[in-house]
Image: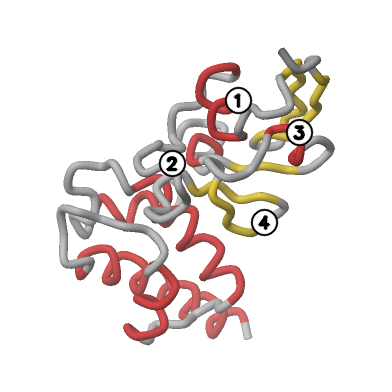
């Protein structure tokens, strides 16, 4: 058995510590050690993208990353999207309003993927660009249209707010 190693990871803005075996995945650390179940495990080979989390602001497959690799870094899970008062953020509200949830299995990864996309491309409403951005997350329930519309609505609202402030 491998010796356990200490890890200290900023998870949703709060430093969390643990002791893990070197082979423990980030997904298992988040789900089993921290009780954050939003990173869903499906294929465990990195194909489906349902375990996506934001690692230093960028999407990673938490089933492919080791917890020790995240030591000293920032990880954001879907549990970190809602505001401190429990109010949903804009993307979560849009997914609800546009019925972009279906079974909900891919929703956490879709939300985090959309967050990264909108941060990197604020106001981008092009359907092809949005579909390309979310193409790394497999949804088995939908044709993705409601998800695209939800993301598009947040992008449009962001553009409108920017225009009003200019």
At a point 57% along the width and 57% down the height, the residue shown is 59
Label 2 CA crowd tier, 10 Å (few <14, some 14–19, many 20+): some
Q: Which residue is mark 3?
A: 68
Q: Position of residue 64 (x, y in %)?
A: 57, 45
Q: In screen coordinates, is 85 left or right of 70? A: left
**Which numbered dot is residue 29?**
1
Label 3 CA crowd tier, 10 Å (few <14, some 14–19, many 20+): many
Mark closer to the chain start, 1 or 4: 1
Mark closer to the chain start, 2 or 4: 2
The CA distance from mark 2 to mark 4 is 22 Å
**Which numbered dot is residue 37?**
none
Tell me the element at label 1.
helix
The CA distance from mark 1 to mark 4 is 19 Å
Q: Position of residue 137 (x, y in %)?
A: 38, 59
Callouts 4 and 3 close, C-beta under 8 Å: no
Callouts 2 and 1 close, C-beta under 8 Å: no
The CA distance from mark 2 to mark 3 is 18 Å
Label 1 CA crowd tier, 10 Å (few <14, some 14–19, many 20+): many
């Amino acid at each position: 058995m491998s010796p356990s190693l200490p890890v200290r990871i900023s998870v949703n803005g709060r430093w969390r510590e643990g002791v893990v075996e070197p082979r423990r995945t980030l997904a298992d650390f988040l789900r089993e050690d921290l009780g954050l179940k939003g990173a869903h495990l499906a294929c465990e080979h990195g194909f489906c993208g349902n375990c996506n989390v934001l690692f230093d602001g960028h999407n990673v497959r938490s089933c492919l990353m080791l917890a020790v690799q995240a030591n000293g870094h920032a990880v954001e899970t879907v549990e970190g999207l809602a505001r401190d008062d429990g109010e949903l953020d804009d993307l979560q509200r849009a997914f609800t309003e546009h019925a972009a949830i279906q079974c909900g299995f891919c929703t956490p990864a879709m939300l985090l993927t959309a967050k990264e996309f909108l941060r990197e491309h604020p106001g981008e409403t092009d359907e092809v660009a949005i579909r390309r951005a979310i193409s790394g997350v497999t949804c088995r329930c939908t044709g993705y249209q409601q998800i695209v519309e939800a993301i598009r609505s947040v992008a449009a609202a962001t553009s409108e707010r920017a225009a009003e402030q200019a």
